[in-house]
Amino acid sequence: MKKILLSTIILILIFTSCNFSKEGTSNMDRKYSIDPSKPVIALTFDDGPNTTTTVEMLDKLEKYDVVASFFVVGNHINDATKDVIKRAYDMGCEINNHSRTHAAMTSLTGEEIKEEVKYTDDKVFEITGERTKFFRPPYIATNDTVYDSIDLPFICGYGSTDYEDNVSPQERSTKILEQITDGGIILLHDFEGNSKTVEAMDLLIPALIEQGYQFATVSQLFEVKGIEPSLENGVIYTVVK
Ligand SMILES: [Zn+2]
């Protein structure tokens, strides 16, 4: 009888500790929940943060319990939006770099490019305590000076011209689903007022889950695929494989 009581107590303790660790799900914990033998993708959003569309996007991610990576514009980070970044980070999302001013980096000098990236990196670090790990060039405009000036791997992705208002939520989702493949990066936008991309999430995320895709941050995608991101000039990732 005593033995049964003891085992019951031990079991209760085990369950309690599991529940505790579940509550504090960090980026690290999520990585280990990704099954490397099954397909995995990274959902990414550019041009935030803001207190409207970015917040609605986070609500959608929360609804489906998935993570994404946000490539933020430094000049959009302020007292009002820093809490939005913090919320995304605490949800297990990754905050990456999309320059300070969203200028085409190809129009700038090496020094100016470095300043653009450093500003955003420092702002993110102040909020999350983590450095940005990847760079998405605005307009995907690159040249050797841009590559030489930035010490981060470059990320592109499968898009669906979701920055054009006449593209419906259905089209935004369908175009991604037509292109997506294991290891793929999805490039969408959470700029202020882009509510059609928020709406598209109710079509896109369930369809991807239905097809067996797991959701990772960009860092987790590289880790799970066992690939070290390249810093070589001209390398910009849409698929990690
Ligand atoms: Zn952009």
Image: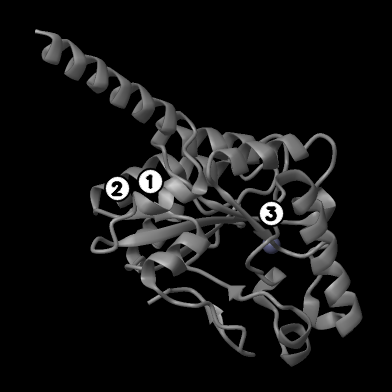
Residue 176, picture quadrant: bottom left
Q: Quadrant of ligand 1?
A: bottom right
Q: Residue furthest left?
A: 1
Inspect the image, locate mark 2, and give the three-letter code of the amino acid beneath it: Ile
Q: Secondary structure at mark 2?
A: helix
The one nearer the camera, 137 or 200, is: 137
Q: Which residue is mark 2?
A: 209
Q: Percent position (x, y) of residue 123?
A: 81, 52
Q: Residue furthest top?
A: 1
Q: Secondary structure at mark 3?
A: loop
Q: Percent position (x, y) of residue 62?
A: 47, 34
Q: Percent position (x, y) of residue 37?
A: 23, 64
- Residue 224 visible in the displayed image: yes
Q: Which residue is mark 1?
A: 205
Q: Is residue 26 left or right of residue 36?
A: right
Q: Percent position (x, y) of residue 153?
A: 61, 76
Quadrant holding the C terminus: bottom left
Q: Residue drawn at (45%, 29%), measured in percent from left and top?
A: 23
Query: Label 3 to label 1, Cα distance in Å?
Result: 27 Å
Which of label 2 and label 3 is nearer to you?
A: 3
Callouts 1 and 2 close, C-beta under 8 Å: yes
Q: Which residue is mark 3?
A: 130
Query: Looking at the image, how many numbered discs can be counted on the residues?
Result: 3
Q: Residues within 10 Å of mark 1 (few under 14, many from 20)?
A: many
Q: Secondary structure at mark 1?
A: helix
- Residue 160 visible in the displayed image: no
Inspect the image, locate mark 3, and give the three-letter code of the amino acid beneath it: Glu
Residue 11, picture quadrant: top left
Callouts 3 and 1 close, C-beta under 8 Å: no
Q: Residue drawn at (83%, 66%), measured in percent from left and top?
A: 118
State which tag comes first along the sequence, 3 or 1.
3
